[in-house]
């Protein structure tokens, strides 16, 4: 995930769920648990491409709609 996209997603998430404002750990959990996982054939040290998170895609594709709709 790139910084501009993530910061925009956090702004949207905090607008939709004001109870998360300032709660970085819960915000991060919402984003990572609702990302669309992506895997790779590439591995980097202890980060195997077939696992999530991995060195290529991290936790995967940011899915702000699913994140905002999550309970």
Image (cartoon, rainbow, N blue to C red):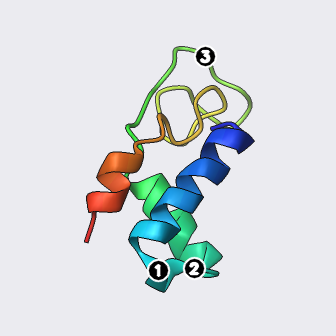
Badge 1 element = helix
The residue depicted at 57 percent of the width and 79 percent of the height is 21
Q: Quadrant of residue 22?
A: bottom right
Q: Give the mark nearest the N terminus, 3 or 1.
A: 1
Badge 2 element = loop
Query: Residue 46, percent across and down?
Result: 68, 38
Q: Quadrant of residue 1?
A: top right
The residue depicted at 25 percent of the width and 72 percent of the height is 71
Q: Which is more toward the observer, 15 or 55?
A: 15
Left or right side of 29 for 17:
left
Is disc 2 surrounded by few (<14), some (14 to 19) or many (20+) residues within 10 Å?
some
User: Disc 2 or disc 3, which is closer to the eye?
Assistant: 2
Query: Residue 32, percent across and down?
Result: 48, 54
Q: Give the mark nearest the N terminus, 2 or 3.
A: 2
Query: Residue 4, percent across and down?
Result: 70, 41
Question: In the drawing, what numbered circle is on residue 21?
Answer: 2
Q: Which residue is mark 1?
A: 18
Real-space Cα distance between discs 3 and 1?
A: 38 Å
Real-space Cα distance between discs 2 and 3?
A: 36 Å
- 58 lies above or below 31: above
Q: Which residue is mark 3?
A: 42
Q: Which is more toward the observer, 62 or 50?
A: 62
Query: Residue 2, percent across and down?
Result: 69, 37
Badge 3 element = loop
Contact check, label 1 and label 2, Cβ < 8 Å: yes
Q: Which is more toward the observer, 32 or 68?
A: 68
């Amino acid at each position: 995930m790139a910084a501009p996209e993530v910061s925009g997603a956090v702004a949207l998430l905090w607008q939709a769920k004001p109870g998360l404002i300032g709660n970085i750990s819960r915000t991060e959990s919402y984003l990572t648990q609702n990302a669309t996982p992506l895997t790779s054939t590439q591995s980097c040290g202890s980060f195997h491409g077939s696992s999530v998170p991995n060195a290529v895609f991290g936790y995967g594709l940011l899915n702000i709609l699913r994140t905002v709709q999550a309970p």
